[in-house]
Amino acid sequence: MTEAASSRASWTDRYLPGEAEADSGQPANVINLSMIRGILFRQRMVLIGVVATALVLGLVLTLLTKPVFQSTATVRIDPNGANIVEGQDLAPTVATSEINRYMQTQGTVITSQRMALQVVDSLKLDQNDAFLGKSVANGKPAGLTDKQWQAQRREKAAAVVRSGVSVDIPQDNRVISINFRSGDPTTARLVTDSYADNFVQADVRRALEANAYAQKFLQEQIVQISAKLQEAERAANAYAKANQIVATPLSAPSTGETKASPAAPTLMVSNLASISGTYGQARAQRIAAEQRWAAIAAIPAGQLPEVQQSPAIQDLYSERAKVVTELSELRQRYGDTYPQVIEAKARVASLDGQIGRLGADIKNGIRDSYNIALRQEQALSGELDKVSAQTLDEQDRRVQFNLLDRQASALRTQLASLLDRFNEISAAANVRSGSITKLDAATLPAAPVTPNLVKNMLVALILGIGLAVVIAVLIESFDDRLRSSEGVERKLGTPLLGFTPYVADDDVSEQANDPFSGLMEAYSSLRTSVDFAIAGTHRIIQVTSSQPSEGKSLSSSVLARKYAQLGRKTLLIDADLRKPTIANLFGAKRSSTGFAEVLLGDVPLADALLKNTPENLDVLPIGSIPSNPVELLSSQLLVDFLAKHREDYAVIVIDSSPVMGLADAPLISRHVDGVVFIVEANRSQFGQTKSALRRLRTAGARVAGVVLTKYRSAEAGLSYDYMYNYYAYGDKSAK
């Protein structure tokens, strides 16, 4: 890319009007607010029509729909119930995490076939022809018995009931709402109340049935266990009698004892325990006596503590001391031969003999105690060995007896537990648990719930808007017309030089004569863009379009005027040899001489120009329309003409015929410095425009850019002020 081209591209990106969206950095295919707004504006009649039709249909359907009444009753559910007496806790407690599932289960129970049949039976709805409606309008079918027909009516009534019932299960409380819809408000209230009553009664019946089943089951178990216990006790007793196992009775078990009592000890075991205890005591006594005797056997009797501490010996010692004292006094007084002395000595000797004999008796008594204890231990040892042998022999027979006794004890405990449970359930059999209670009875509905005019119209509005949007999008998807400036650049891949606002045909002349009008301001911006897009001096600019009436002639004439107003000598050539319009734009009639005659050299250029044109502007119209335009434009005459007059003018603007279907524009484009391609907004097809540009480039044309004419900002999704007032700075209203 050359430096001049780079600078032109940079300037175009920065200053071309309407490019704010293109510089936003959004991907070209992203749906933005402008695109949505444009679709809504362009398809407004479709949207309004479809939405209005949907609303009318919604209103008609609402008025034609039969009114339906709804009645509501509420029931309170306590999953864990209230246990008034023991035995009411047959059902397991519902865990907190399972309460929601429990509530959903209750809702399913309410809408079940069984509950519907209970409601039908309680209200006798199977006998109500008005309730059954069309299902029994033809009467009993042929081939059915009365019983079969009655069963069929009952099933049909249940189906009608199920079709109208619904439940509301909240998340934050345990109150379920039961709803029923019917065309008759009285029927709706009666059926709703019946549903609530039957639901509560079903819960009570279920609890009573559970208690009755538990009672029956326990009774059967008690009978079976009693029979087994009797057999077990008889077997244990027979075995004990046959094997001479005598058990002592135990004390009664304490209240509330649940474990099996230990087996009662036999008489042999009791004897063994008693003898073992007695033998232990005798052994201890023998050991003590033996140790005592071993300790005093070698000690003289007089030195024994028992002897010394004996009161009798102490008395003898006291008496001897008195006698010895008397003997000592008598000896000192009378001598040893004195009779009283001899008598005193005899008394002392007698006392010593008594003391010695008494001490020997005490020592012999200790020895005798040891001998007695030894003989007792030996006797008890023999008895213990005998009883132990008998007990060991009994233990062999006791094994089977203990097994039989344990079986009887286990059955005895099981029977006691069953009896306790049976008594608890019997007490709770006729007590209501109260897990489900009726909270609010159904009321007579004052107004129908359907049809709801506001709701139906809102639904119709939403559906209408949705359908209208779908239709609008489908229409837009098949419509490839070019509408916006960014769409032109994105789809055509060609720079946008500018755009001109839409102006009504009656207002074109007025705005063309007002230099501050939006139209003229747009062309002033376009002229600046063309200067940067087609640089240099003595330029030749071609203006063309893909099809007629897109605004190329007006754009050519106004663009030439703008260059002339800048003081540049400008030549405007009407090269549309098929449908010339330049002369009419300058208020002149077509003359007999013009562009074709000048090319052929029949008249000089000066003689063919229009008179009374603006200063610095020469206009070369079409004179007579040649019979061979293609041959004329493809000849050397056009090349020579442009080469001859290029230096005479700063700008030469050529208004050529449309591209599609004609060869004129591509032939001229090979000899100009740049082509300004005109595209009419909301009319030019993308495919047709793309083909026209391809033809020009194939012919070697240098397309400078595209001009979007008759641009409607609302059609493109932009506000009116955003585009139109952008060029109305000099408008009178703004002054």
Image (cartoon, rainbow, N blue to C red):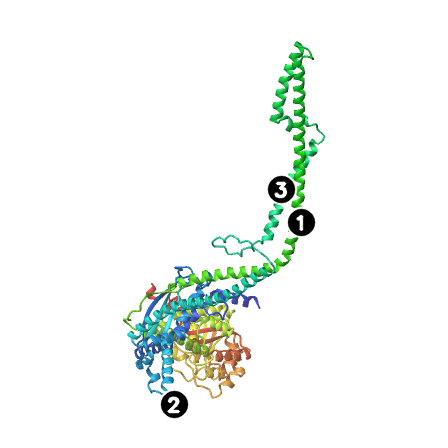
Identify the residue shown where x is 39% and y is 63%: 433
Which residue extends farthest bottom? 142
Q: Earlier in the sequence, mark 3 or mark 2?
A: 2
Q: Which amino acid type corresponds to the residue marked 3 in the rendered image?
A: Gln
How far apart marks 3 and 2 lie (CA) works out to 104 Å
**Quadrant of the image occupied by residue 512:** bottom left
Q: Looking at the picture, does residue 276 appear above or below residue 242?
A: above
Q: Earlier in the sequence, mark 1 or mark 3?
A: 3
Q: Looking at the picture, does residue 117 appear above or below residue 433?
A: below
Which of 522 and 343 lies nearest the eye of the viewer? Answer: 343
Check disc 3 and report the residue beneath it.
281
Identify the residue shown where x is 33% and y is 85%: 137
Secondary-structure class at tag 2 = loop
Q: Residues within 10 Å of mark 1 (few under 14, many from 20)?
A: some
Which residue extends farthest top? 333
Q: Which amino acid type corresponds to the residue marked 1 in the rendered image?
A: Asp
Q: Is residue 518 left or right of residue 295?
A: left
Check disc 2 and report the residue beneath it.
143
Which of 215 and 475 lies nearest the eye of the viewer? Answer: 215
- Of the two numbered discs 3 and 2 in the rendering, the one whose residue sits closer to the viewer: 3
Q: Earlier in the sequence, mark 2 or mark 1?
A: 2
Give x and y (percent) for residue 561.
42, 72
Q: Residues within 10 Å of mark 2 (few under 14, many from 20)?
A: few
Give x and y (percent) for residue 472.
41, 76
Check disc 1 and report the residue beneath it.
385
Q: Quadrant of the N terminus?
A: bottom right
Marker disc for residue 613: none
Give x and y (percent) for residue 228.
52, 65
Disc 1 to disc 3: CB gap under 8 Å: no
